[in-house]
Amino acid sequence: MKYKSLSLIVPAFKQEKTIINDIKNLDKALTSLPLKHELIIVVDGFLDKTFDRLKKIKNLEIVTLGYRKNQGKGYAIKKGVAKAKGDIIGFIDAGRDLDPTQISLMLDIMDWNKADIVVGSKLHPESKVSYPLWRKILSWGYRTFTHLLFGFSIKDTQVGLKIFRKTVAKKVFKRIIVKKFAFDIEVLAVAQKLGYIKIYEAPIKLNFKKALSITTSNFWSVIFWMLWDTMAVFYRLKILRYYDKK
């Protein structure tokens, strides 16, 4: 493998109960890889004791960042990318819904194909996925919508596990505006705009264990802001040509 180091960013929001075990699990998976690694945990708002617990970890390969006010997953990952030093820079959702051992295969896929980006995909034929019907329906609808707008070549854009060559990550993420909804869409749309089209999908193991985050009371609000942010990306990309100017 030509790559020497990996930086993996973990956005964390109100996860004081599980964060230590989550990070130990990730660190164990990365330690088994044939390259150096750093874990960058970005605490998205000091709303509980997540940051305090992470700061007690004595491990030079684990870096903890944070800020007082919750900003959103996209903002957190952008902060982590700015700090990252690895030849490969990636991110993974906190929690243990996604199996981090799949990162090894993603690195191989990147190496074999000289890829710019490798994304985890629920739709890969070798993926093992367990998640609720309502999420499958939402994923299908949003996926169809975004493919019509942006013409992505990959099938699944939304999995919270992606890796990038360092040059790609640094150039793409400095242009990212979306803090919360449609963050993944903006990242892939900007990468495509900049000519980074060697994007490959990798199988994942996903066991959705989180509590329902979209309730009846906020369901339509979430849908509205997802569509709003997505259309804003389209407007900046196609009309303003904003990403060309940065």
Image (tube, rainbow, N blue to C red):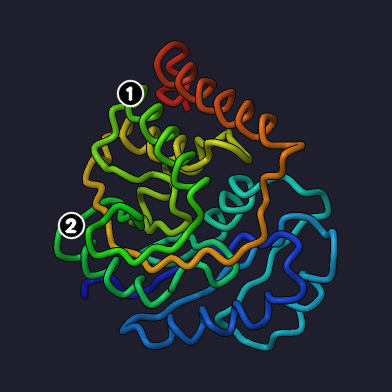
- Residue located 58% across and 34% down the image: 177
Q: Is residue 114 above or below residue 173?
A: below
Dot 2, how many residues are within 10 Å of its Cα: few (below 14), some (14-19), or many (20+)?
Answer: few
Instruction: Check disc 1 and report the residue beneath it.
Output: 148
Q: Is residue 65 above or below residue 159?
A: below
Q: Secondary structure at mark 1?
A: helix
Dot 1, how many residues are within 10 Å of its Cα: few (below 14), some (14-19), or many (20+)?
Answer: few
Task: Pick whichever, 78 or 15, lies toward us.
Answer: 15
Return the mark for residue 43: none
**Most distant residue in the left direction:** 112
- Residue located 71% across and 44% down the image: 215
- Residue located 77% across and 70% down the image: 50
Q: Position of residue 54 (x, y in %)?
A: 73, 77
Instruction: Check disc 2 and report the residue beneath it.
Output: 114
Q: Which amino acid, mark 2?
A: Lys
- Residue located 54% across and 72% down the image: 96
**Relative to 59, is 134 on the left or the right?**
left
The first of marks 2 and 1 along the sequence is: 2
**Relative to 161, is 46 on the left or the right?**
right
Q: Position of residue 237 (x, y in %)?
A: 42, 21
**Relative to 44, is 234 on the left or the right?**
left
Q: Position of residue 46 (x, y in %)?
A: 83, 60
